Amino acid sequence: MFPPFRYFKPKRIEEVTAFLAEHGESARILAGGTDLLVGMRRGEFTPDVLIDIKGIPELQNLSADNGTLPIGAAVSVNDLLDSAEVAALFPILIQTALRMASHQIRNRATVVGNLCNASPAADMGAALLALGARVTIASPRSRRVLPLGEFFTGVKKSALGRDEWVISVEADTPPPGSRMGFLKQARVRGPDLSTVNCAAVLLPDGALTLVLGAVAETPVVVTGCGSDKGNGIADRVREAIAPIDDVRGSAEYRMDLACLMTRRMVEKLTADSRRG
Amino acid sequence: MDSHTIEFEINGKRASLEVVSHRTLLQVLREDLHLSGTKEGCGEGECGACTVLVDGRSVTACLTLAVEVDGCSVRTIEGESEGPDLSPLQEAFVKNHALQCGFCTPGMIMSARALLERNPSPTEDQIKEAIAGNLCRCTGYRPIIQAIREAAARRKDQSAKG
Amino acid sequence: MSEGLIGKGVPRIESFEKVTGTARFVGDMDLPGMLHGRMLLSPHAHARIVRIDTSKAESLDGVAAVLVGEELPYRLGLYMVDKPVLASGKVRHHGEVVAAVAAVSEEIAARAADLIEVTYEPLAAVFDPVEAVKPDAPLVHEDLHTYHTIKGVFFPRPHTNIANHARLRKGDVEEGFAAADAIVENEFSLPQVAHVPLETHRTVAHWKRNGAIEIWSSAQSPFAVRNLLSVALGMSHSRIRVVVPHVGGAFGGKAGIHLEPLVSLLSRKAGHRPVKLAATREEEFSTLPCRQGLVARIKTGVTKEGKITAQKIEYLWDAGAYADYGVNIGRAAGYSGAGPYDIDNVWIDSLTIYTNRPFGTAYRGFGHVEFFWAIERQMDMVAREIGMDSCDFRMRNLLRPGSVTITGEEITENTGSVEKCLEAVAAEVGWKERSSLGSGGNGKVRARGIAVLHKAPAMPSNTAISAILKFNEDATVDLMISGVDYGQGTATAFCQMTAEHLRIPMENVHFIWNKDTDRMPYDWQTVASRLTFMGGNAVIRAAEDCVSQLKDMASRALDVPVGDLEIQDGKVFVAREPARSIDYRALVMGYMFPSGNSIGGPVIGRGTCIAEGLTVLDPETGQGLPAANWTFGAHGVEIEIDTATGEIQVLKLASAFDVGRVINEALCRGQVVGGCLQGLGTALLETFIYNDEGCLINNSFTDYKIPTARDIPIETKEIFIETPQLNGPHGARGVAEHPMISIPSAVGNAIADALGVEIMELPLSPERVYLALKRKGNRD
């Protein structure tokens, strides 16, 4: 049960931008609604206006072009799973999507929404950070492109200004021979939030980008080299993260999981590359 | 209060309805359309008791606004079979004792329906994955998984014959 | 056609309604003029209510009534009458209901509840039963000495937080310890957990202008709701009608009385309009009752040959803020709490203790899931201490014919066999061959564990049930019994028994589904795994009553002695001349001779069952007969532990129960498979989590996880032993609760057996297992 609000379903990006400019923080973007509506039910958000962006064709965009995959703001997690192109080029996104929420929720939840919710445990946040993705942000003034690493600024906080919104996230296709993976530790095997997640991309030249989620206020990016068997990088992870105790796990457990998952990830990626 | 006229298809029939923006699809199904087979178990999309199909895809009706289904086709448990007949999927649930209290059953069947439509021959793991968002506290899930397997096998048999 | 129905796995009779979504639950009801209720909950664990201002809520358009505790001088309770309808004077737990609203829509009711202003003055609170029994602990109930309870059965200690002290004394434990070669002492604990029926508590109530009350509720026990409401309001039973339609899961959490008084009183205040109240999921967690927490201290004396010489036990139950039902859980642990073992010297103190937490109630197993966590872990630890195989150790000490239970009851050949259950599961999981278990590799370790269990129905010694069979003109028969089937399958079992005893096809038995105190015969409560056992006896007696009426008329119609008549295929016939028969259809409304003279009359069968032979227990020693029957069981489990993360995968779970006689093989199996997974929930993941102020912080499915389809064991095996219960229907005993019991202990024992870490608390979550392994590594 939600408190009353007004509902708009614009057909063009510019209309959304104009609505946001007009209503400021009393308006929220409705994409999948799976975080927004839960938050509204719990009284965490009380918007006067919801702007449903699912009627805007461009925001459904999900086709790689010139080595870049744009994921429009209305693309659901299951849309991603259904894409042969994504499966071929970005197996990490498939692995991640499969560990996110239930099938029903994934039919609604969007990839961009998972980023905008800015949870430190966002699984897509970790995976897209590992891919070095960027978000495209629209506002009345202009569009700007921001590396995802600069997008997350705190727990449930992002770099979005009050009249800004994300219209897509883009990732470049990693060079041939790249390895990538996603690991998640949760309380149950069924749908659950991550106690800790770990996403990584290992480039053919040995450069490793590893991201750990739910271990600090924002997902943490650690870079290194795939050849150090994970030990050196596990030490750097230990220094880089700052987990806390919460309802899903203790700081101690998270710290140890993060190091373990780092080692397991590096083992997995380097084993893949030896095989591959 | 902000309201909209929506036109959609409900279990194969066209409907036109005036809905207030902040009402969920679950509320409108149960209260306005009197389709009370769809249940509310948590209101937060976590239990799956309110699972319905929108344009063939399963969603939790508690986290879907009614206004959002304008122009869509919605299917609920009431559309699964008619009169005294049961669908093969429902029959498989009965035969395999895949229900106890019955409260999760409509949502469970809708998740199974969506699965079989996108994947007519699911593996056991795929079945588990497909219903992992439908909580059941009674059955321990095993008979439900068995029912869905059997329904899939029957469909396969029939399409082979047909 | 009716031959051999007993034991058959026929599908449940209400399947059609449930798979089509047409089964009607309380939430699906709508009455003309119906209002919607909403509760305002306490944000504090313990606080004085200084002031409540309802004026803003009352002036909101569409609000019909606002209720606060001061207006309601009523107290409720099944065993300990300690619970107000709304908090009055003070709140005793986070989530307690402080005020309630009835309004024309859910939205207005919610808005009105938000407009009620409450001023609280926080009080010192107590959250731990160990702390709560200390002399200087804050008191949860200052007026405990004034509360009504059942004298001679429950023993509250006035001016303390002890709501009940149950004692069991058998033999002399000090002598037993003196005779022991080893003494093993341990403390175990487990947290509060939730029942999690998929349907939250829902009630529609209509307090009519003529003073009568009609209630539709998702309740386990319509007559218990009626009785407790009648007692609380001082109103005649005949003025209250309680109807229970389909119920979406209960597990003990809908036994006794819950939202019904509040919704009735809202209806009265709202100008006698019907009111519906549906608990939200959050309220289901923090406002409706949960399962009690437990701290268990056990001291066991044992000889080096493995004979237990003495066991001294202290159970400290965390009742939470109210113990209206909870005191009887502590009492059950008093007479059952040493496990199915033959021990000469036993001492149990079982204390039910108030704390400022959400309150506990019956939950599948009624205390046994909780204390068996301690008992069955302790048995493994004792066996390890004396270097004995824990299966052999159990076999040495289990109850068997000739043994005497801790309350003085002699076990006979017909009581059931826990030995057979243990043997079966040990063989099934390869207990003796576990040394050959390979490693799963990559830090994964395989482990096996076993545990046994028992439980008797926990119920007053005068518990009764009745059944009516009423024939229709076409010789179909209506079956009326007020035990509620919220998924167990009992209704189907009753139809099987009825058809079997009337010799008619099962489809000719019409089970009356809505339980209605105005129309249906009395039943005490649907609890305690007693319904198939006691209700089955009542149904069979009702069928026999029908048969005797049919034969009586047929004997006069055919002019043969009653003793010469038999029944089959819906006919009464002469045994030696089967061709001489009368169809039931010619008898069920009375028999008419060709002359037109008529005899007999409509056939209505009546059957009852009361818990015969039980006694009140001795207040000092707990000696007596508390158990109508014992269902014994055992679990064997094989798990794989990821030692790097602490995650556990259940590879195989084998469970055996001596059910006496299986009535419906498929539904019986369903109880076991479902109950075992609920047990795994308790074992592996479920727990209430509080912040320092005593607020439940995981009161949603986001953070209170129950097992999903991906969390089930890879393989399960259900084994039924059939040692007939002499006074059971076809020899049957109940098995609804038992599958859940001792699952946690079997898993905990497996971890200890394979990895040498003794985990004493639940749940065995990945984090707890991991940290236990890490600490052990640090110590070694």
Image (cartoon, helix red, strand yellow):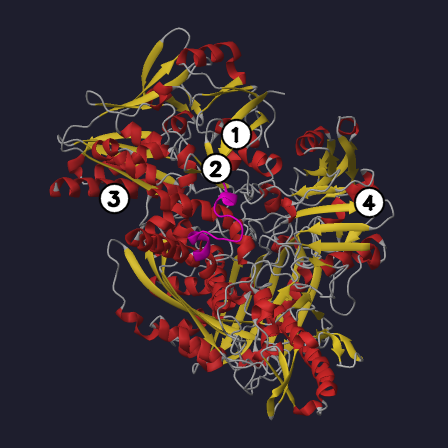
**What's under tag 1, amino acid-wise?**
Leu
* Whether marks 1 and 4 lie on the same chain: no
Mark 3 Cα shell of 10 Å, populated few (<14), some (14-19), many (≥20): some
- Residue that lies at the very extreme toward the front in this rendered image: C595
Q: Is residue C553 left or right of residue C693?
A: right
Q: Nearer the viewer, mark 1 or mark 2?
A: 2
The stretch drawn in magenta includes residue B91: yes
User: Label 4 crowding class (10 Å Cα cut-off): few <14, some 14-19, many 20+?
Assistant: some
Q: Secondary structure at mark 3?
A: helix
Is C718 situated above or below B143?
below
Which x, y percent locates residue C53? 78, 30
Residue A256 at x, y percent in the picture: 34, 43
Residue B12 tag number: 2
Q: Nearer the viewer, mark 3 or mark 4?
A: 4
Residue C308 vs C278, above or below: the answer is below
SS assignment at label 1: loop
* Circle nearer the viewer, 1 or 4: 1
- Residue at 65% x, 37% y is C43
Is circle 4 on the same chain as circle 2?
no
Magenta stretch in the rendered image: B76-92
Q: CA distance from mark 1 to mark 3?
A: 42 Å
Q: Position of residue C420 (x, y in %)?
A: 45, 79
Residue, disc 3? A264
Residues flagged by tags 1 and 3 on a common chain: no
Q: Amino acid at mark 4?
A: Leu
For disc 1, the neighbor class at 10 Å (few under 14, some 14 to 19, many from 20) is many
